[in-house]
Image (spheres, helix red, strand yellow):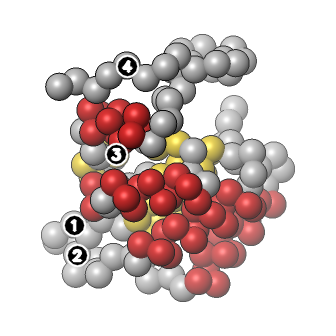
Amino acid sequence: MSVCSGGILGLGENTEDRIKMLEVLAGFNPPPESVPINSLVPIPGTPLAESGGVDNFEVIRMIALARIAIPKAKVRLSAGRTQMSEEMQALCFFAGANSIFYGDKLLTTANPQSEADLALLKKLGMMPQQPKPDMSSPEPEESKPLEPALA
């Protein structure tokens, strides 16, 4: 079994709350293999619909802190990416994110189009990890180069 545990930024928490979340996650034995860092996506009709969201630099800081606190984890740039520019997402990768949730939808919110994700990764000189259909098999040594994004 592998553990995937992270948090949503923008729920009214403060910096101390965010650091405590990472402290708790880093204390797991074993630590989580996957740490998604989500940004609140305000949805009409919900209590936080009028939320102003999270400052971009706060998200980048959390990515960097997660990378330091849980160095072996896949730090996943997760919900809220549709509101992020390519430059913002790139800064998150440079700060330590090494994974995204890929596909059209994340539970209740939209995700960037797959073609847009592939194009951004290619721009950044990054390659997606190949899928592992058998979770018990070891991770591949090398990733297959990116295929060109659909035109």
Q: Quadrant of residue 22?
A: bottom right
Secondary structure under the numbered disc 2 in the rendered image: loop
Q: Nearer the viewer, mark 2 or mark 4?
A: 4
Secondary structure under the numbered disc 4 in the rendered image: loop
Q: Upstream in the sequence, badge 2 or badge 3?
A: 2
Q: Nearer the viewer, mark 4 or mark 1?
A: 4
Residue at numbered disc 3: 106
Q: Upstream in the sequence, badge 4 or badge 1?
A: 1
Tell me which amino acid carries mark 3: Leu
Q: Tag 1: Cα neighbours inside 10 Å, few (<14), some, or many (≥20)?
A: few
Q: Quadrant of residue 6?
A: bottom right
Q: Upstream in the sequence, badge 1 or badge 2?
A: 1
Residue at numbered disc 1: 43
Tell me residue 123's x, y (percent).
39, 40
Q: Can you see residue 77? A: yes
What label sits on residue 49 in the rendered view? 2
